[in-house]
Image (tube, rainbow, N blue to C red):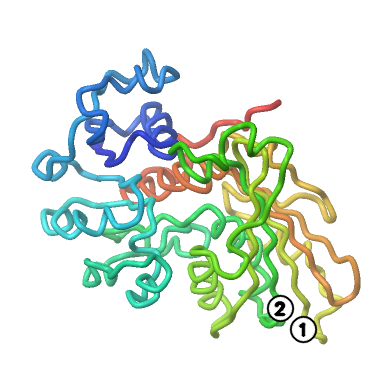
């Protein structure tokens, strides 16, 4: 049994993380922090946890956090970097669900997030926590950078073809849609029901913060630097990400059996489901589950379209963090994560 703390527990990601951890047989959620809600019972803010969690929010206290075996940060960028080095120095392991340690280049972080990285020395300790691509490096890590939700769907969709050297790296286009919970719990005009319902719009077309993260990890898979066009859209739904991924096969590989390549690549992965060729996965099929469902299409010789869907709050955030925790502490990777998706 390990004792864990959550810093930043009042957002959707923190709530989802606590929901998963309270049902985990090897975890005691011992501490959850919030400056704004300190002194408030967690189940009064999140009534779905009533009868399952009797914690009260407290202010972030370094001494209390240092007594944990593991600390999760479910905080906006710029928060974790000020606390993580001290926790690492005291032997606490950390999983950051924010963006502070995803980019390996501190200059790139400053460019995309508009602030200097104040813990650049800790970047060398960070392991990118997408188990399907970095599993071998996670168990010994002290600090895991949990991937973003869009990057999870995009990287998993492209990984088999890039790892096999099959794609022309100049042809990658990721057209992605997300539910509004991906934008967080803060009140924003564009996210209220009258603004978001019955509407669809793109954003970040000229440059989104997840693009350098995606390019960083895809370049590692491809063995050479690459770029892609990443276009996110806001959908009038609560949960889910749908990534439509385009590419061109190298000319000599236009007749390759794409379905077999995906099936072999993910054949032993517990949380990646390869659907029959030319299927159309729906976001509702993964709601509440730590699953990525993928389907491959080949509309024309040499062209490939990959469809990848996840729940942005589970496989795209809290579920993946628990998957990383299981690897860190030697638990079965699927422990606490075998929930069946919710339908309808």
Element class at badge 1: loop
Q: Position of residue 46 (x, y in %)?
A: 40, 22
Q: Are marks 1 and 2 in contact (CB under 8 Å)?
A: yes
Q: Identify whether 306 is placed above or below 11.
A: below
- The residue at which mark 1 appears reads as 250
User: Taking the image as drawn, is residue 33 in sight?
Assistant: no
The vertical placement of 198 against 234, above or below, is: above
Residue 167 badge: 2
Q: Residue at x 44, y 60 (%)?
A: 135
Percent position (x, y) of residue 11? 40, 37
Residue 38 vs residue 204: left or right? left
Q: Quadrant of the N terminus?
A: top left
Query: Which residue is depicted at the point 54% across and 42% down?
Result: 290
- Above or below, 208 against 332 in this view is below
Most distant residue in the right direction: 300
Q: Residues within 10 Å of mark 2 (few under 14, many from 20)?
A: many
Q: Residue at x 39, y 58 (%)?
A: 99
Quarter-wise, where is residue 63 in the image?
A: top left
Outermost residue on the left side: it is 63
């Amino acid at each position: 049994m390990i004792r864990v703390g959550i810093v930043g527990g009042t957002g959707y990601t923190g709530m989802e993380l606590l929901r998963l951890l309270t049902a985990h047989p090897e975890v005691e959620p011992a501490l959850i922090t919030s400056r704004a809600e300190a002194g408030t019972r967690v189940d009064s803010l999140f009534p779905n946890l009533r009868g399952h969690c009797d914690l009260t929010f407290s202010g972030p206290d370094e001494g209390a956090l240092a007594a944990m075996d593991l600390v999760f940060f479910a905080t906006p960028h710029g928060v974790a970097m000020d606390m993580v080095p001290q926790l690492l120095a005291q032997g606490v392991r950390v999983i950051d669900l924010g963006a502070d340690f995803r980019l390996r280049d501190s200059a790139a972080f400053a460019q995309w997030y508009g602030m200097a990285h104040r813990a650049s020395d800790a970047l060398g300790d960070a392991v990118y926590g997408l188990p399907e691509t970095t599993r071998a490096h996670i168990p010994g890590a002290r600090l895991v950078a949990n991937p973003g939700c869009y990057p999870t769907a995009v990287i998993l969709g492209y990984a088999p073809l890039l790892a096999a050297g099959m794609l022309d790296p100049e042809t990658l286009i990721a057209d992605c849609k997300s539910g509004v919970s991906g934008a967080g719990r803060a009140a924003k005009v564009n996210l209220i029901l009258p603004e978001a319902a019955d509407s669809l719009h793109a954003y970040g077309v000229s440059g989104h913060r997840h693009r350098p993260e995606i390019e960083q990890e895809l370049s590692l898979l491809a063995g050479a630097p690459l770029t892609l066009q990443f276009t996110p859209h806001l959908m009038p739904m609560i949960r889910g990400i749908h990534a439509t991924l385009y590419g061109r096969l190298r000319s000599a590989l236009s007749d390759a059996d794409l379905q077999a390549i995906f099936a072999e690549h993910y054949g032993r992965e517990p949380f990646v489901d390869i659907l029959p060729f030319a299927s159309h996965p729906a976001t509702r099929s993964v709601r509440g589950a730590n699953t990525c469902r993928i389907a491959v299409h080949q509309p024309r010789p040499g062209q490939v379209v990959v469809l990848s869907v996840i729940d942005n709050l589970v496989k795209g955030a809290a579920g993946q963090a628990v998957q990383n925790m299981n690897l860190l502490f030697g638990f079965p990777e699927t422990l606490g994560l075998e929930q069946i998706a919710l339908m309808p």
